[in-house]
């Protein structure tokens, strides 16, 4: 059998943005006088195919128009669904990925999000000490260390005997605390932390309560290794909500029908959201629907974790933390 190949193609389509916003509120960021009339967007889609006698023969999952015609009970919604998923990837997934930057020297991704939380937590400790006037209760010392070899050529860091300086004077302690606080403010103000808006460069303008709210806002409701799976779950649920809500698809007590599962499977394929190995296993309509249903299971692991979702709120005091939800302000 011939090898399966894939290409990316930019597809330009027109969608109904007002309808999309009903199911994906964050899409409102694209709403303006022009898009109220006509929302035209370019979507990069993956197409997998086999090359037979010099001709590209697309795999069944990538015949999206045919799948939509066969499975959807009403016409005129296929473009909306593609545009909606593209917006989910650009906004929710895009926001999550802003937490990572490539360390070119090491060739690894650095999680800036975790670094910001650490800086905020340390800043909160420093501010709390000042708020509670506990400077005189602070203790600590500067300690010189050095690396010494241990077994098998490994190195271990040890304190150098007699090379410690105690912080004992309250004025000196206060200066050190202020210096540390200012350094953390400076760190948080760096351009690479553009996703976190640290408005003032003076730590005296922040309270420990405000800083705790900032920490809570930055804390993601899921573990990083589950991000891809939880995002796919959000996409599947959003698409299902759309096709149920806009087409009044009567399905009785069934969470998701085989037809709906096949359609959503095609959407995930087009956006390269299914691992190729898994995709090759999903051969029949039953296989595809069964795979999509895994995103709707009520596993214990999913009760406390959900991907980021955006809603529009008037101000930050209206941010809500609810079960399986995390709401972020859209400016």
Image: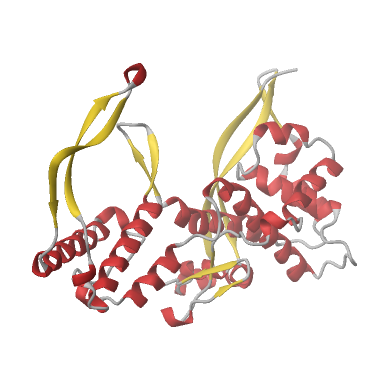
Image spot of residue 145 (x, y percent): 19, 38
| 111 versus 197 height, above or below | above
Q: Nearer the viewer, residue 259 or 115?
A: 115
User: In the shown orientation, is residue 28 left or right of residue 157?
Assistant: right
Q: Closer to the camera, 224 or 132?
A: 132
Q: Position of residue 60 (x, y in %)?
A: 76, 37
| 84 horizontally vs 298: left or right | left
Q: Position of residue 303 (x, y in %)?
A: 68, 61
| Foreground residue among 75 and 290 | 290
Write down the quadrant of residue 297 in the picture: bottom right
Quadrant, the C terminus: bottom left
Identified at 85% across, 56% down, the residue is 257
| Residue in the picture at 65% in, 41% down | 274
Instruction: For the N terminus, give its image quadrant.
Output: top right
For the point 55% across and 37% down, the residue is 8
Instruction: Give coordinates of residue 204: x percent, y percent.
Output: 20, 75
Relative to residue 305, is residue 203 drawn left or right?
Answer: left
């Amino acid at each position: 059998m011939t090898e399966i190949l894939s290409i990316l193609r930019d597809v330009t389509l027109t969608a109904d943005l007002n309808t999309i916003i009903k199911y994906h509120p964050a899409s409102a960021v694209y709403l303006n006088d022009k898009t109220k009339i006509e929302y035209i967007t370019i979507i990069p889609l993956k197409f997998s195919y086999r090359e037979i006698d010099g001709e590209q023969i697309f795999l069944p999952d990538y015949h999206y128009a045919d799948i939509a015609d066969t499975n959807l009970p009403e016409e005129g919604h296929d473009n909306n669904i593609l545009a909606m998923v593209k917006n989910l990837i650009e906004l929710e997934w895009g926001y999550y990925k802003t937490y990572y930057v490539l360390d070119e020297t090491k060739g690894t991704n650095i999680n800036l999000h975790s670094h910001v939380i650490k800086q905020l937590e340390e800043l909160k400790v420093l501010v709390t000490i000042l708020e509670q006037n506990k400077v005189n209760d602070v203790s600590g010392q500067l300690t010189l260390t050095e690396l010494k070899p241990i077994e098998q050529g490994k190195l271990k860091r040890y304190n150098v005997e007699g090379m410690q300086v105690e912080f004992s004077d309250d004025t000196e302690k206060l200066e050190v605390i202020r210096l540390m606080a200012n350094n953390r403010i400076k760190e948080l103000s760096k351009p690479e932390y553009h996703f976190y808006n640290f408005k003032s460069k003076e730590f005296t303008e922040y309270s420990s309560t405000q800083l705790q709210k900032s920490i809570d806002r930055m804390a993601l409701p899921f573990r990083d290794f589950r991000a891809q799976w939880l995002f796919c779950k959000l996409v599947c649920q959003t698409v299902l909500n759309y096709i149920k809500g806009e087409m009044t698809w009567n399905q009785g007590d069934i969470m998701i029908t085989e037809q709906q599962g096949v359609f959503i499977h095609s959407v995930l394929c087009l956006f390269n959201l299914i691992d190729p190995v898994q995709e090759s296993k999903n051969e029949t309509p039953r296989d595809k629907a069964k795979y999509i249903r895994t995103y709707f299971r009520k596993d214990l692991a999913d009760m406390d974790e959900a991907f980021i979702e955006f809603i529009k709120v008037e101000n930050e005091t209206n941010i809500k933390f609810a079960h399986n939800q995390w709401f972020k302000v859209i400016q």
